[in-house]
Amino acid sequence: MNVRRRHISAVALTAVAALGFGTLTACSSDSAAAGDTGTFDVVASFYPMAFLAERIGGDHVHVTSLTQPGQEPHDLEISAKQTAQLEESDAALYLKGLQPSVDDAIGQSPIATKIDAAELTALEEHGTEAGHGEEHGDERGDEHAHEDEHGHDHDHEGGDPHIWLDPVKYAEVAEGVGKAFQKADPDHAADYRKNTATLVKDLKALDQKFRTGLANRKTDVFVTTHAAFGYLAERYGLTEEAISGLDPDTEPSGARVKELQQIAKEDGVTTVFYETLVSDRTAKTLAGDTGLRTDVLDPVEGITDHSRGEDYFQVMEANLTALRTALGAR
């Protein structure tokens, strides 16, 4: 595919900026301001996809995100203007199953290169309990997990979409995105290949930090408000017990709250985790009722002023620190 070379007037640039896209880096905005002299234009659905596009594309890409910093990705509704802008881009990078309005817009778009991260690694089913703790599932989780699959998970029929929270799976996605970029923009294939290799190396190093950092711990169980960490739990032999399901706005039942209180007592849980983009009310209520502390475990769905870091790697390392404290790792 030949990257289209467009010259954008100042008036047109103002109109594009008004569409509500978030430009992620200085080099991206510089390329647009210079008149878009041949950059590969990529629209990403939300932060984890935009991060991949930027790291892999480097100076050759102009990345825009459909989801603004601080906006809950699950709640995104694509505007008509954003749909029109999407059709003018060279590629779309998204994660099918996470944002239905994005899935619909990209599905109907004539854009030449559509990259679905969900097709680049294996998705799994996760409910309110996820991880290696089969003994918990046998004793108390099977019935609830079955209920959750047919309740909370109705918007994620293809499986749990939170693959970026597992560095190994995220690396698999990165490799697939790199190949797609190489095919779509062959003039810069060598750089895309090199950047992908560097990113994959960094993700493997992050994986090793988690393995080492969580190796000696007092408990395997952690409690979250949002069932976003199923892949991370499975990767490192942990069990995530979520107050609600895969959708962060789902209200827990009284029975689930009571169940979690019992789990906390039996498994030595010290902390109820909440996230930066969703209210901490439920976490603090449960923690107050059980005498537990609260802390942030960030699903890295967006970077804001409240994030514990400026990019994916910094926030994931902050998550590791929080988990080590909560699990009593030495």
Image (cartoon, rainbow, N blue to C red):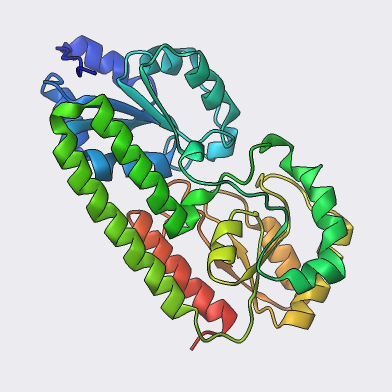
In the figure, is residue 188 to the left or right of 225?
left
175, above or below 207, in the image = above
Q: Quadrant of the N terminus?
A: top left
Snapshot quadrant of residue 28: top left
In the figure, is residue 228 to the left or right of 135?
left
Q: Residue at x 18, y 35 (%)?
A: 189
Q: Residue at x 29, y 40 (%)?
A: 178
Q: Is residue 185 visible?
A: yes
| Total numbered circles | 0
Q: Residue at x 26, y 17 (%)?
A: 14
Q: Residue at x 50, y 72 (%)?
A: 322
Where's residue 158, x and y in %?
64, 38
149, above or below 280, in the image = above
| Nearer to us in this view, 283 or 325 | 325
Where's residue 244, x and y in %?
73, 53
Where's residue 239, x and y in %?
66, 69
Snapshot quadrant of residue 65: top left
Where's residue 99, x and y in %?
56, 32
Q: Is residue 51 visible?
A: no
In the figure, is residue 246 to the left or right of 137?
left
Snapshot quadrant of residue 261: bottom right
92, above or below 243, in the image = above
